[in-house]
Amino acid sequence: MVVEPQIQRRILASSGFADLGLYQEAVDELEEIPEQAKDSLPVLSAWLEVYQSWQKWGEAVSVADRLTQKDPEDPSWFVALAYATRRARDLFAAREILQEASVRFPRCAVIHFNLACYAAQLGELRSAGRYLAAAIELDRSFAELAKSDPDLEPLRSVV
């Protein structure tokens, strides 16, 4: 999708404001986008970025859910939905989202890695180990990340 220059400028301005912690200004920029473009992937993605930065998790859940509906072939929207759901609701709901996503995207390392984190936080260390092994098999860079991710501390403490 080609984004009109005026919309692209609003998205970039919004991102800049969010980076500076000026969240209301970021929202103001996005609200100025013409109505017919507000449900486009670039604009929804910009809203998600703002809400995640602002830690407005309920709003982030709504936008990420819309992104999973509009672009169901992109696993990153499911990861974003789970991330926001974990913070807005709970770990169990977030895990359910990623478990369903792992069936749809069995070769997505980040989904397996996040499932490892969730399992470790829930004390399900065997499951955490299996998910982590799957993530590392798909993408070796997760081996290094696993050494410092705080969610995996329960798993590291038994190894």
Image (tube, grey):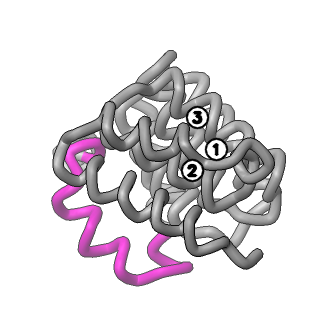
- Mark 1 near mark 2, Cβ–Cβ under 8 Å? yes
- Mark 2 near mark 3, Cβ–Cβ under 8 Å? no
Q: Position of residue 121 (x, y in %)?
A: 35, 32
> Is residue 11 one of those drawn in magenta?
no
Report, in whole angstroms, how far the alpha carbon at label 3 lies from the one at label 1.
Answer: 5 Å
Q: Please report the bounds of the magenta region as a residue range.
A: 135-152
Pointer 1 residue = 98
In the figure, residue 153 lies in which quadrant?
top left
Pointer 3 residue = 95
Q: Secondary structure at mark 3?
A: helix
* Foreground of the two, 81 or 147: 81
In this picture, is 91 found above or below 124?
A: above
Please give the label number shown on residue 79: 2
Does the rendering let one see residue 23?
Answer: yes
Going 37% across and 39% down the picture, which residue do you hit?
120
Q: Which one is earlier in the sequence, the residue at label 1 or at label 2?
A: 2
Q: Position of residue 154 (x, y in %)?
A: 25, 39
Q: Secondary structure at mark 1?
A: helix
> Is residue 150 one of those drawn in magenta?
yes
Magenta stretch: dominant SS? helix
The residue sitting at the bottom extreme is: 140
Q: Is residue 152 left or right of residue 128?
A: left
Q: Is residue 118 left or right of residue 44?
A: left
Q: Nearer the viewer, mark 1 or mark 2?
A: 2
As shown in the figure, which amino acid type bears the numbered disc 1?
Answer: Leu
Please give the label number shown on residue 72: none
As shown in the figure, which amino acid type bears the numbered disc 2?
Answer: Val
Q: Secondary structure at mark 2?
A: helix
